[in-house]
Image (tube, rainbow, N blue to C red):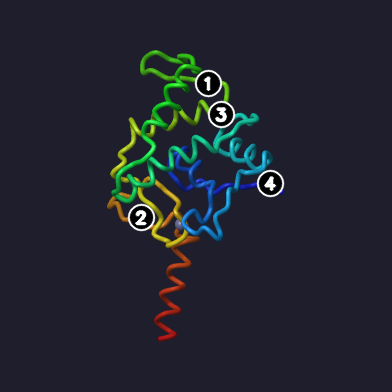
Amino acid sequence: MRFEPELVGGHVVLDLLNTVAWRLDPDRWVDRIAEPGARDDWLRAVGLTPAPSDLTVLRETAYRVLQPVAVGAKPEGVDELRELMVAAVGKARIAQLNPLRWQADDPVTELTLATWRLLEDEDLGRLRQCQDDDCGWLFLDRSKNGSRRWCSSADCGNRARAKRHYRRTHP
Ligand SMILES: [Zn+2]
């Protein structure tokens, strides 16, 4: 079965972090790209060339840095992420000089460089964690008034509305 990822993070690295579903619920936590076929489907969906690669180390290291930022806590794993980024630059070539653009042949290196760009270029004040208790997905809130609460209003947003409705009608 083909894996059709939901790309709702607003940045490829956040979409990578969101390949873990139900991140905040140990009973339901699931790695959606654990199988090579699913991993390749995900890489294709974000425009990268599928290749045998372990995305887990980058994903979990970047998560330890970015999730606390999203909730206003102190990031962890910054040194580990730094090591990954330095190694990625070591493997990349300069595709364009002005503005500088790195390019690599393998998806892990590309995604590590994308993590650097996320930290350098994006307004992390807009980084949010979905307000569902168990979801844990991260996204950049690009809404004008900064009011986005859910990874997906059709999914977690809908569930929250249903829950509120249930509480109102079942006092
Ligand atoms: Zn969610």
> Is label 3 in a helix, a strand or a loop?
helix
Residue on which the image places disc 4: 2
Residue 4 location (% of width, % of height): 61, 47
Question: Residue at the location (53% across, 53% down)?
Answer: 21
Residue on which the image places disc 1: 104
Residue on which the image places disc 3: 107
Residue 60 location (% of width, % of height): 48, 41
Residue on which the image places disc 2: 148
Q: Earlier in the sequence, mark 3 or mark 4?
A: 4
Q: Nearer the viewer, mark 4 or mark 1?
A: 1
Number of residues whose C-alpha sits closer than 10 Å to that of mark 2, classed few (under 14), some (14–19) or many (20 or more): many
Question: Residue at the location (36% across, 34% down)?
Answer: 78
> Is label 1 in a helix, a strand or a loop?
loop
Instruction: State the mark number for residue 119.
Output: none
Q: Which of marks 3 and 2 is nearer the N terminus?
A: 3
In the depicted structure, whether residue 26 falls above or below residue 78 = below
